[in-house]
Structure formats: C-alpha cells, structure tokens
Amino acid sequence: MPLQLQQPSPSLSPSLTPPVGGRNGIKPEKIIVAHDEMDIVFGSQRIRKNGSSAGHNGIKSIISELETPDFTRIRLGIGKPMPGINIADYVLSEFSEEELETIAESREKWAEITKMIVSESVETAMNTFNRKN
C-alpha cells in the first residue's frame, strides 16, 4: 500500500490540506494526521479515528478543506505551557534538550503506530497504544 508523507508549513497556514484532500482522490478515512496536542503529556500519544478539532487550528483547517472530520489523528502530546506563557508562543517554540531526547525515544513507537494503522486498522492501533499505564 503506497504511503504519502507530508509536513505542514510552520506558519499555521492550511498549506497541508490541498495536496492530501479529495482533490487528489485520497479518501479522508485513508488520511492519517499526526499533530501536537496540549491536553496530552509531553512524549505520550493518543490515536483517534475522527472527531472535532478541539480548538486546534491546524485540525480546523484540515476539517474545513476535507469537508469532514472523518480522518485518523495521532495526537502527539506536547503538554501545557506554564501559566502566563502565550499558547502560540509555546506551540511554536523550540524544544529543549530534554524534550528532544523524549522525542527521539518516542519516534520508533510513533512509526509503529503508523505502520499498525496502515497494515492492520485504526482500531487495533487504538486498542494497543491508547491503553493507560
């Protein structure tokens, strides 16, 4: 099964969605979006089959472009900013050395999640990786 990977523009523009949407004949249910999620602890993840944007501007743009919320998300935890820190500044800030180490340790798991979604199913990946420790 062919797999196409794309990276969004860091400017928060909806430049990701036109090439992956229905305009290229890719069905929304075949799209997997990995995105940052402040409501999840840094380095953790949750898989969702579909749903609302939960206020995430990038996901809002993708839902708008695809005209459906029915695509898979791998929500990658970035944690919440300290009180008084602007959310946009926090989300766009550089990672600390410690955070980079956590990301390096998590990459293999995130790749395995993607492989499982593609080769088996979203449900299997959710049942395997969304478990609480």
Image: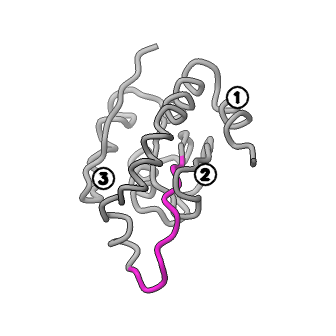
Disc 3 is placed on an element classified as: helix
Q: As shown in the figure, which amino acid type bears the numbered disc 2?
A: Gly
Q: Is residue 20 left or right of residue 47?
A: left
Sequence-first disc among 3 and 1 = 3
Question: Label 1, on which residue?
Answer: 124
Q: Counting other residues with Cα less than 10 Å from the Cα at mark 2, is it few (<14), some (14-19), or many (20 or more)? A: some
Sequence-first disc among 2 and 1 = 2
Q: As shown in the figure, which amino acid type bears the numbered disc 3?
A: Pro
Question: Label 2, on which residue?
Answer: 51
Question: Which image quadrant is residue 117 in?
Answer: top right
Q: Position of residue 36 (x, y in %)?
A: 46, 54
**Above or below 65: residue 105:** above
Segment colored magenta = 75-85
| The residue positioned farthest toward the top in the image shown | 1
State the separation of the CA atoms marked 2 and 3. Answer: 18 Å
Question: Label 3, on which residue?
Answer: 14
Q: Position of residue 13 (x, y in %)?
A: 27, 57
Q: Is residue 61 left or right of residue 10?
A: right
Q: Is residue 20 left or right of residue 29?
A: left
Disc 1 is placed on an element classified as: helix
**Above or below 77: residue 119:** above
Q: Position of residue 109 (x, y in %)?
A: 54, 34
State the separation of the CA atoms marked 2 and 1. Answer: 18 Å
**Residue found 38% across the figure and 26% down from its top:** 25
Residue 13 is a magenta residue: no
